[in-house]
Image: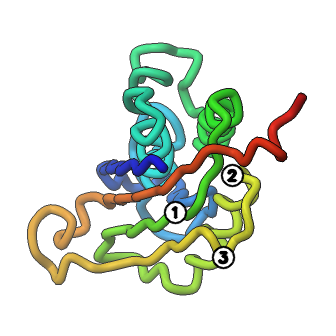
Amino acid sequence: MRVGIGYDIHQLKEGQPLILGGVQVPHTHGLDGHSDADALTHAVCDALLGAMGEGDLGSHYPSSDPRWKDMNSLDMLEGVCAKLEERGLHLVNLDAVIVAQAPRLGNYLAEMGKQLAGVLRVDPALVNVKVKSHDHLGALGRQEGIAAQAVCLLADVPSDEKPG
């Protein structure tokens, strides 16, 4: 068994699309970053990479590389999943929290979980996404950004399920 934790934060910027967990959420501001700035998916990627001992998302998809400009973060997650398969590991479960004062995200959480589970090729019941506000405290409470944190548990693929 291997556990990993991931964290990401992005600044909100007017006129940008707000994408979290691969879901576009209607809002006047979106997250600013080199890729699509999907903080939730980035945190999930970091958790998985950490559990594998593979560093962080920035070491695999550096913002200094123009190839990753405006990249869909679900495609990044797909790349991380390929590493899981290469290593003979599978996801046991994933728990994530988005920290956002606004917009209200409750109606989008199930779809975010489904999007992530689809890329991870697991039952959506193994992916939990929740949201918390910052109760108007600090930069997140002032709606200057959105953060996300994720924790995952990985296990070796049972030998009878391994290819070959």
Give the residue pinned by disc 2: 120
Q: Amino acid at mark 1?
A: Leu
Report the residue that reaches farthest toward the front: 159
Q: What is the distance, in whole Å, between disc 2 and disc 3 at their CAs?
A: 12 Å
Badge 3 marks a residue whose secondary structure is helix
Residue at image point 66% right, 76% down: 125
- Where residue 69 appears, x then y in whole percent? 54, 26
- Where residue 155 appears, x then y in whole percent? 57, 49
Q: Badge 2: how crowded within 10 Å, few (<14), some, or many (20+)?
A: many
Q: Amino acid at mark 3?
A: Ala
Q: Is residue 163 left or right of residue 9?
A: right
Q: Badge 3: how crowded within 10 Å, few (<14), some, or many (20+)?
A: few
Figure disc tally = 3
Marks 1/3 in contact by CB < 8 Å: the verdict is no
**Sequence-wise, which precedes: disc 2 or disc 1?**
1
Residue at image point 48% right, 14% down: 65
Q: Is residue 141 left or right of residue 150?
A: left
Give the residue pinned by disc 3: 125
**Sequence-wise, which precedes: disc 2 or disc 3?**
2
**Sequence-wise, which precedes: disc 1 or disc 3?**
1
Between 30 and 51, the one nearer to me in the picture? 51
Report the residue that reaches farthest toward the left: 138
Give the residue pinned by disc 1: 94
